[in-house]
Image (cartoon, rainbow, N blue to C red):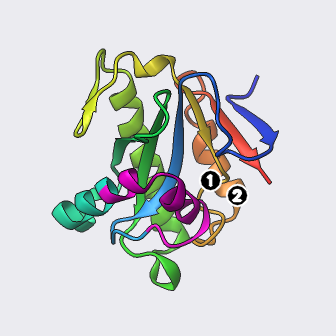
Amino acid sequence: MSNLQYIKGNILKLKNYPHILIHSCNCDGSWGGGIAYQMSIRYPHSERDYVQICEESGSDLLGKCVLIPSYSEDNLIIACLFTSSLGGSGHGSKESILKYTKDALEDMYNLINIPDAVTKYGGVSQLNNYKLEMPMINSGIFGVPWELTEQELLSFKGKMEFTVYQL
């Protein structure tokens, strides 16, 4: 059985269960396109935190995951997978994005499996009970064929299960 479940629908639709919205992002502090742009509109305080984190750490974030509260939904945490230094047309190669995706997913796994994990902006207990949800990361602006990112996700079988939203 696969650790990936595919659903057609809007990943930003309100949910009544605890979940982590996972997205790949740049270290440049820009949620300017794709799902990140939609999140910047819906979760402006989260975007503010993301920009501050990028200003403080820049490219040192590559291959890392940062958990940010949504501030508007008690049962939602945003997981930023830092997979490229720059956004837009200045993004990294597909090989580097895939490497940093795998590293960031490993970092996320470690974060969510620490009992009573604490994010920089507040505490959340038992994150390993949260459902992991994502769009088809890397396949939009970063231009990585979905099948390649899918292989990275499948390598976490037995460790993490993901729900992947398709439009």
| Kind of element beneath mark 1 | helix
How far apart, in angstroms, are the residues tagged by discs 2 and 1? 5 Å
- The correct choice, above or below, for 55 with respect to 117 in the image is below
The residue sitting at 30% across, 15% down in the picture is 115
- The correct choice, above or below, for 122 with respect to 79 in the image is above
Amino acid type of the residue tagged 2 in the rendering? Trp
Based on the picture, tell me whether residue 41 belongs to the magenta stretch.
yes
Residue that extends furthest to the bottom in the rendered view of this protein: 89
Point out residue 140 in the picture as x, y percentages from the top left corner.
65, 68
Report if the CB atoms under discs 2 and 1 are less than 8 Å apart: yes
Q: Which quadrant would residue 123 be assigned to in this image?
A: top left
Quadrant (top left/top right/bottom left/bottom right) for the N terminus: top right
Point out residue 138 in the picture as x, y percentages from the top left corner.
59, 61
Quadrant (top left/top right/bottom left/bottom right) for the C terminus: bottom right
Horizontal relation, residue 74 to residue 34: left or right: left
Which residues, given as a range, are shown in magenta?
A: 31-48
Amino acid type of the residue tagged 1 in the rendering? Thr
Q: 10 Å neighbourhood of mark 2: few (<14), some, or many (≥20)?
A: few
The residue sitting at 36% across, 46% down in the picture is 65
Point out residue 26 in the picture as x, y percentages from the top left corner.
41, 66
In-front residue for pair 109/43:
43
The residue labelled by disc 1 is 149
